[in-house]
Image (cartoon, rainbow, N blue to C red):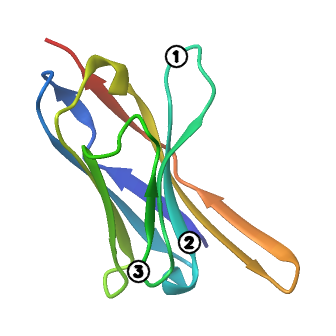
């Protein structure tokens, strides 16, 4: 069955770094656009970063541009989010998302989320 499993979250001090991973299985990973979303307490889920299926193009939310880097390894069915210069406002649950549209049908998968807490 389809699985997206995030890892790498935790507690980090402001200015620190974390690398999130999302291991995918049960679908053709290399055919999907991959995204990272986050949701802070009391706030709506927001898109953080996205990467095209072959990894040739990336996009970032303005709030993380220049600090976060999204990448993927299609040989390992894994995507990553390198988070640098972390701020308290980056505290949230981070979710991995895979999406593909084929012949008018949308395939949309989510991970269970990993908590990132930025605090001194």
Pointer 1 residue: 41
Residue 119 lies left or right of residue 115; in this view the side is: left
Residue 19 lies left or right of residue 41; in this view the side is: left
Label 2 crowd bin: few (<14), some (14–19), many (20+), radius 10 Å: some
Where residue 26 sits in the image (x, y, percent)?
Answer: 56, 78
Compute the Cα span from label 2 to label 3. Answer: 11 Å
Residue located 39% across and 78% down the image: 77
In this rendering, the answer to whether 53 lies above or below 88 is below
Residue located 57% across and 77% down the image: 32
Residue located 11% across and 32% down the image: 16
Compute the Cα span from label 2 to label 1. Answer: 26 Å
Pointer 3 residue: 56
Label 1 crowd bin: few (<14), some (14–19), many (20+), radius 10 Å: few
Mark 2–mark 3 contact, CB under 8 Å? Answer: no
Pointer 2 residue: 33
Q: How many marks?
A: 3
Earlier along the polypeptide chain: callout 2 or callout 3?
2
Earlier along the polypeptide chain: callout 2 or callout 1?
2
In this rendering, the answer to whether 57 lies above or below 89 is below
Label 3 crowd bin: few (<14), some (14–19), many (20+), radius 10 Å: few
In this rendering, the answer to whether 33 lies above or below 103 is above
Residue located 31% across and 81% down the image: 76
Task: Give SS at disc 2.
Answer: strand
Task: Give SS at disc 1.
Answer: loop
């Amino acid at each position: 069955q389809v699985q997206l499993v995030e890892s790498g979250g935790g507690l980090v001090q402001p200015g620190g770094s974390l690398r999130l991973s999302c291991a995918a299985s049960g679908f053709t990973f290399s055919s999907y656009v991959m995204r990272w979303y986050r949701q802070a307490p009391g706030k709506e889920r927001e898109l953080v970063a996205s990467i095209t299926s072959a990894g040739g193009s990336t996009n970032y939310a303005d709030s993380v541009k220049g600090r976060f880097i999204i990448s993927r390894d299609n040989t390992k069915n894994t995507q990553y989010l390198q988070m640098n210069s972390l701020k308290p406002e980056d505290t949230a649950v981070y979710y991995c998302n895979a999406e593909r549209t084929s012949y008018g049908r949308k395939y949309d998968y989510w991970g269970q989320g990993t908590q990132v807490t930025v605090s001194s």
